Amino acid sequence: MHYEYAIEGGNFSKAGLASSEVKKKLRQLNVDNQVVKRVVVALYEAEVNIVAHAYNGTMNVEIDEEKILLVLQDSGPGIPDIEKAMEEGYSTASPEVREMGFGAGMGLSNIKKNVDHLDISSEIGKGTRVEMITYINRGR
C-alpha cells in the first residue's frame, strides 16, 4: 500500500495531521500497537521538522507485510551538520517556533530511537530527505 501526503511549511495548525492519518491506517491493518506507537512518534517528529524548518514537503508511506517505509522530502534550507543535528537538545528552531512549544532539539534523536533504519541526506539551499524503516514482525 502506498500513501502520499503534502506537508505545508509554517502551518502549525496542521502539524501532525498526516501522522494521525497514518496511525489510523496502521490500526485498520491491525499492526501491533507498539509498532504503531514507534512509527507515529518518528513520523510526527519528522513531519513537525518540515513544518518548522521547510517551505513544504511530502510524506510517502509504503506498507507491506514486513515493514513500513517512510520517506519525507522537503524543500527548505537543508541541514548543514547532520551529525550535530542528531544530538539531543541541538536545535536551529526560530524563537517563534520555540514559543509555540516546538524546536526542543529532540526530533531527530527521537526518530532514531523509534525506527529500525534511518537515513538522512540534505543539501544546503535545496532541502532534506529522511528515510525511515520500521519492521512489523520482528524486533529492532
Image (spheres, helix red, strand yellow):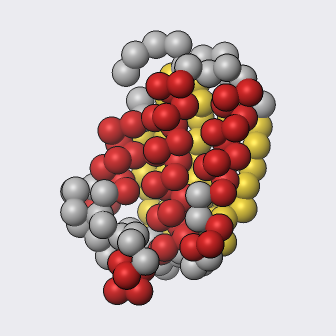
Residue that extends furthest to the top in the rendered view of this protein: 138
| Image quarter of the N terminus | top right
Q: Residue at x 65, y 67 (%)?
A: 14
Q: Quadrant of residue 114?
A: top left
Whether residue 123 sits left or right of residue 64 in the image: it is left
| Image quarter of the C terminus | top left
From where the camera sits, is residue 87 visible? yes
Q: Where's residue 4, x and y in %? A: 75, 50
Q: Residue at x 47, y 25 (%)?
A: 34
Q: Where's residue 100, x and y in %? A: 43, 77
Q: Where's residue 132, x and y in %? A: 50, 40
From what the image shows, is residue 47 above or below residue 99? Answer: above
> Of 131 and 124, which appears nearest the observer?
131
Whether residue 57 sits left or right of residue 122 in the image: it is right
> Of 111 and 118, which appears nearest the observer?
111
From what the image shows, is residue 38 above or below residue 76? Answer: above
Q: Residue at x 53, y 13 (%)?
A: 137
Q: Residue at x 61, y 49 (%)?
A: 19
Whether residue 63 sits left or right of residue 78 in the image: it is right
From where the camera sits, is residue 133 visible? no
Q: Where's residue 62, x and y in %? A: 68, 35
